[in-house]
Image (cartoon, rainbow, N blue to C red):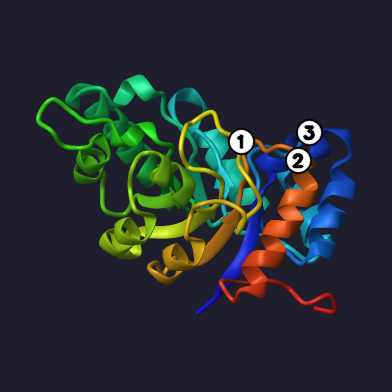
Amino acid sequence: MPKPIAVQLYSLREAAVRDLEATLMRLGRIGFQGLEPAHFHGLTPEAFRTRVEAHGMEICSSHGMPFGDEAAAILDQAMLVGSPLVIVPFAAPDRFHNEAGIGALADELNAALPLAQERGLGLGYHNHFWEWTELPDGRPAFELLLERLDPAVVIELDVYWAQVAGQDPASLLAKLGERVTRLHLKDGPADLPESAMTAAGEGHVDLAAAASASPAAWHIVELDRCDGDMFDAIERSHAYLTGAGISLGRLAND
């Protein structure tokens, strides 16, 4: 069953800096149902939410680092912008080199969880490729991270980075099951980390198989970088995912 489609605004960070209103307008006209922000581009969370909703979209989740002295403020902002889920978008590669680093990261995430829950929010983690670094005992670091995390900390699985790490996204998603509540659907050669990404359906990731293997509530288009015009790639991604029946867009008259 297709799931609603959203876009991570980080993909269009340059366009959003130039003209946020025009960027949101175009995304709404393309037919995205949701938006996942990483920043509010100078607006208050309430004002940002109003602009997103004015263009027919909702905040499906948001990226943030709710740690240390900034934790409460970041979670409060997520609550005010209407995000049901805060995703930690990044942890440095060197944190996955040994059990101590992974354990410390898990402790930070576990400590942030009750702060999020107090505000009615969920908490999640977004992967790159280095989470599958092999530990001295032969296990992938990602496996140990999941063991150390509170089961309530969910995963936003980036299927492209998982494949770059040598994983089969569909098999991985089948194993993770309901732990994954958001899917980052991106495409490209999936060979080297520095390779440019492509619009969905134009690379080597089987996005249909990945989506079918997961009950994730939202499908989120994200391209870290690409050759050519980013907005065109985002629009082609939407067209492919909705046209193939993988994801569910919003009708123009909705």
- Taking the image as drawn, is residue 188 in sight? yes
Query: Residue under circle 1?
Result: 196
Label 3: element kind: helix
Q: Is residue 101 above or below residue 8?
A: above
Q: Is residue 87 left or right of residue 54?
A: left
Please state which of residues 246 and 12 is positioned toward the viewer in this rendering: 246
Q: Is residue 206 above or below residue 91?
A: below
Q: Type of residue at label 2?
A: Thr
Residue 44 is labelled as 2
Q: Earlier in the sequence, mark 2 or mark 1?
A: 2
Q: Position of residue 158 (x, y in %)?
A: 47, 48
User: Is disc 1 surrounded by few (<14), some (14 to 19) or many (20+) residues within 10 Å?
Assistant: some
- Asked if labels 1 and 3 touch by Cβ distance under 8 angstroms, the answer is no
User: Is disc 3 surrounded by few (<14), some (14 to 19) or many (20+) residues within 10 Å?
Assistant: few
The C terminus lies in which quarter of the figure? Answer: bottom right
Give the foreground label among 3 and 2: 3
Label 1: element kind: loop
Name the residue rendered at 46%, 38% in the picture. 191
Q: Quadrant of residue 212?
A: bottom left
